[in-house]
Amino acid sequence: MDLSRSDIKVLIEIYSGKRSISMISAAVGAGPSQVSAVVSRLEKKKLCRKKRNGKRIDIEMADNSLGLAFRRLIINSRPLMIEKFLYGIRLRILSSCLYEAKTTEEISLMLNLPRKSVQNVIPPLLNRQILKRKKQHLIFEKKAWPFLFDFLDACRNFSLNGSVLWRLEDEVLFEVRQKEEIKGSLTGFSAYVDYGVPVINVKHCCYMPRRTLSKTEIFIHSLLQVEDDARLLELAVVFFRKNKIRQRDAVKIAARYDLRKKIQDFLLVLKSKDEKNRNRKLSSCF
């Protein structure tokens, strides 16, 4: 989720009890029209809501996972530090390496940012121990910043479109049970049939925004659905071999979806000649 400094300042004031545009405007030192635009933007992002109170319309924090996570973040952090530091490109970078370590090149590709812009922001995040290095990779320091992690985690997993499998900004993978709920492009096991591997699906896996997906992307998306289901793992193996997925492409795309470790383990097991215990070993990867 992309939040500007103005977004964060207004959210902090809403949290502190400022319920009207005029009160928030006075607190942040901005014009009512500017504050009104920010509130509308935050409302669309499901971080705040407007509630009628007689003839007056009050503004309050959203009563959902996003609003609750932001409340906990403010309670357990310094609001001034959050307002002056945790917004814009910094939040976007932190979100991208929240679950799995990424290189600066991978982060720049994920966020569609120049690599130099990413590199310039990294030092202060390292200095404040929000990020830590693992050789050439960067990973969020969850132990040092648990409430910030929870807020970013809520941002990445919040959706009105069914059960979220993975999300980053406008890109989201989710599952729905009803055909009427399908949005965007079918992917994962729901798209296997188009590549010669029929699957009986209880859930439909969707990707938004709608676009044509490669067979390698479809394969990687299916790994997000697997969990510990041996039957689905076997189907993934069949799809991988039947469609001759290139290992190099699979590893590159898997990194985007926080599946680097799982795809490396998956490929390692496939190389094993121990076919008898393959399913058990594959299950342990997930």
Image: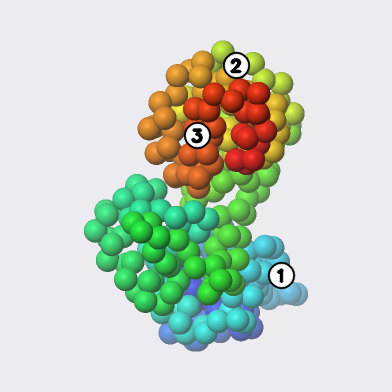
Q: Could you give the CA–CA distance between mark 3 and mark 2, rounded to whole angstroms? A: 23 Å
Amino acid, disc 2 = Val
Instruction: Please indicate whether residue 31 sits to the left or right of residue 157 in the image.
Output: left
Q: Residue extending furthest left?
A: 116
Q: Is residue 208 visible?
A: no
Image x and y of residue 10, in percent: 51, 76
Q: Which circle's residue, 3 or 1, is located before the other in the chain?
A: 1
**Image x and y of residue 155, in percent:** 57, 59
Give the amino acid type for the residue marked by disc 3 in the picture: Leu
What residue lies at 45% left-to-right and 82% top-to-bottom?
81
Is residue 139 visible to us here?
A: yes
Label 1 crowd (10 A; few <14 / some 14-19 / many >=20)? few
Residue tagged 2 = 197
For disc 3, the marked residue is 268
Above or below residue 183? Residue 200 is: above
Q: Residue at x 34, y 74 (%)?
A: 124
Disc 3 or disc 1, which is closer to the eye? 3
Residue 52 - label: 1
